Image: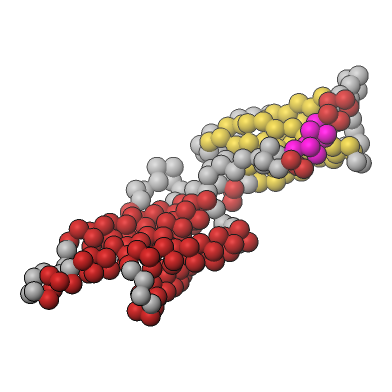
Amino acid sequence: MENLIISLGIGVGASFLAYVLLYRLTRLRAYQVSLVVIVAMLCVFLPLQIIFWQSADVFAIHLALFIITPYGMGIVTAQWESNRDIKREGGRWFHWAPATIVAFFLVIATVDAIIITLANKGMPGGLVGRILPEPRSGAEHVTSHFPGTVANDYFRKDALLHEYLERMAEQEARGWQVRQGWLQAPRQGQPAIFQVKVVDREGQPLSDVHVGGEFARPSDAREDRSFQLEAVAPGVYQGPVALPMAGAWEVRLRVERGEEVHEQRGMTSVREG
């Protein structure tokens, strides 16, 4: 949250200061100053975001707040300009409508900043026990962190897509047959034997391969667990694996022999301990 608050604070402060200086030192009207400040901000902000890209939601909240600040200042200042005569006559120069609009957008930006921070880093440890209910599974450590499922990006980048398709074509032509599974139902925090059987196109076992991979947690990449299997029989590889959380896991299997690589993915489920 600190980085987000700092970047938003610097941007808003710079926009506010630029608006005040331009309005005081030039003869531009309120909305003209707002337009100049917004264009100048975009010329600085967009290149920096391209270089130091974080995420779409962080970009959106910065862009919205940096535009809202000079625009809101323009609304308030334009109201002052239109009410100068009223003020001179002893009337009320302040109107609640523009102030309400500015306050509304500030509240929205603040709430969005909090939501983005909680989604990326989770709730502070001191608040978890006070706000969240007690875990029913008996877990000692509770986190509200949820980075979301990270999708494979092969189809987002042409170079990676081309390389991936070539590997899949070579793998299919090679004809290796790989079967994987548990010897007993896996339970949370308890070691269970994971087995992989590898044979060639003719069904002959492959005993000179290296078998390993990763169990990936779709909801939290920090819980991913890598594994390596040992040969226990011709073409049969086993190893104990203990997964820390119940629920769905993605299996990313990799079988290697020299420069030949066979990749395989699947899903499995872990019961509560």
Identify the image quadrant of the N terminus: bottom left
Residues 40 and 104: in front is: 40
Residue 49: quadrant of the picture: bottom right
Left or right: residue 5 versus residue 190 is left
Residue 187 lies, in percent from the top left, at 57, 36
Count of marks, rendered view:
0
Residue at 27% across / 68% down in the picture?
Answer: 77
On whether residue 44 falls in the magenta region, the answer is no
Q: Main secondary structure of the magenta part?
A: helix
Q: Which residues are magenta?
A: 161-168
Q: Position of residue 29 (x, y in %)?
A: 33, 69
Q: As drawn, is 267 to the left or to the right of 113?
A: right
| Colour scheme of the rendered structure | secondary structure
- Residue 74 in view, yes or no: yes
181 or 123, nearer to the observer? 123
Please tell me whether residue 63 is drawn above or below residue 29 in the rendered image.
Answer: above
Viewer-side residue, 169 vs 244? 169
Residue farthest toward the top in the current orientation of the protein: 202
Residue at (44, 66) in percent of width and height = 36
Residue ranking furthest to the bottom? 25
Query: Where does residue 183 sit, x and y in percent of width and height?
Result: 68, 29
Residue 196 found in image quarter: top right
Q: Quadrant of residue 126?
A: bottom left
- The residue sitting at 49% across, 66% down in the picture is 40
Q: Please tell me whether residue 266 is drawn above or below residue 245 in the rendered image.
A: above
Q: Work out whether residue 237 can be spotted.
A: no
**Residue at the image position 17 percent from the left and 63 percent from the top:** 95
Residue 237 placement (x, y as % from top left): 80, 34
